[in-house]
Amino acid sequence: MKIAAVPKIIGIILLAVSLLVSTAYSARKQVIKIATLTPEGSPWMEVFNTINAEVMEKTAKQVRFRVYAGGVLGDEQDLIRKMYIGQIHGAVITASSLTTIFKEMDVLQVPFLFQGYDEVDYVIHKMDAFFKKGLEDNGYTLLGWSEGGFIRLMSITPMATLDDLRKGKIWVWEDAPMAKAIFKEAKVSGIPLSAPDVLVGLQTGLVDVVYAPPAGAISLQWFTKIKYITDVPLMYLTGSIIVKKEVFNRLSAEHQAILVDTFQRHMGRFREIVRKGNRDALRVMTKHGIQLVNVSNDEIDEFKILSERAVQQPGSRRFSDAALEQISTYLKEYRRDNQ
């Protein structure tokens, strides 16, 4: 062997050793980067921090989460793009945006679909395997169901009728085609904005009507700019904590089981916190002078009919008839057994 070749061979050996060490280390340590629009200090983040601490303890710190909260990485479609290119590994995404991954998730956004949380829990339990498989087939593992609660209109002037809505400057989420279709059917001009831009829109007068669960309006500070809440639950806001399947599959079977078990146990607690938070948020807002606006049954019926028409319009929805029929069957089943 030529002496001149020795340093080269040594360099190759050192490189190989460093790669082996790096691979072994990465097999032991896994940092899962998760992003969410939810602000720091919110109930969701408190629960997630508890989950993170438990996962670290049970995996001897071999698995942990790094969370980017408060929309610092952009809106939900930005998060989906960042997951796709590998910049982050997972995210908390609402059903409306999850439809870009698995279109059937859109069925959970149908207005007036659920009459209460008991129906929500029953249907999600029944449809859990269906949604999990759909996300799995598209490259994502569902760790748990997140929740925002029932959405209400919030405004600077009272919104009690469709005519009132038509006079307002209504925010419409860029990622919600069904909401756009409903406003179009109602002959309402929506102003599309990403969720992080809504507060600025309220501050500048670009919009004067928004919609959110009460607790969400407080955590996002929207409630500081509104004066009225229309006391009609329009639709249920749900979402999921997902991670890329390839990232989840890197974990050992033991660590995968720890993640799934930990999320399942804590998500039930999280839902109770969110539901209580929404009840408390309504009380806090009304205590600070925000007025509840009652809507007549005739107006509610008209809005339901209008929403049903909008859902049937081409391009307004992504879910199949079969998915809606399945959920409708479960709802009839639940209502029949719980009269």
Image (cartoon, rainbow, N blue to C red):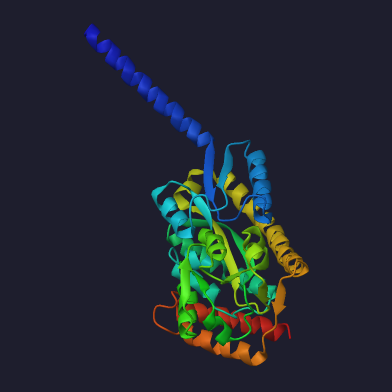
Tell me: residue 143, above or below residue 238: above
| Side (left or right) of 11 relative to 309 | left
For the N terminus, the image quarter is: top left
Q: Position of residue 145 (x, y in %)?
A: 60, 61
| Side (left or right) of 287 relative to 250 | right
Q: Residue at the spot x=29%, y=16% of the render?
A: 9
| Image quadrant where residue 303 sits | bottom right
For the C terminus, the image quarter is: bottom right
Q: Is residue 279 visible from the viewing direction of this image?
A: yes
Q: Position of residue 18 (x, y in %)?
A: 41, 24
Q: Residue at the spot x=73%, y=67% of the render?
A: 285
Q: Position of residue 16 (x, y in %)?
A: 37, 24
Tell me: residue 201, above or below residue 78: below
Q: Nearer the viewer, residue 29 or 94?
A: 94
Q: Nearer the viewer, residue 337 or 274?
A: 274
Q: Nearer the viewer, residue 88 or 263?
A: 88
Q: Position of residue 329 (x, y in %)?
A: 58, 82
| Side (left or right) of 304 relative to 88 | right
Q: Residue at the spot x=57%, y=40% of the render?
A: 63
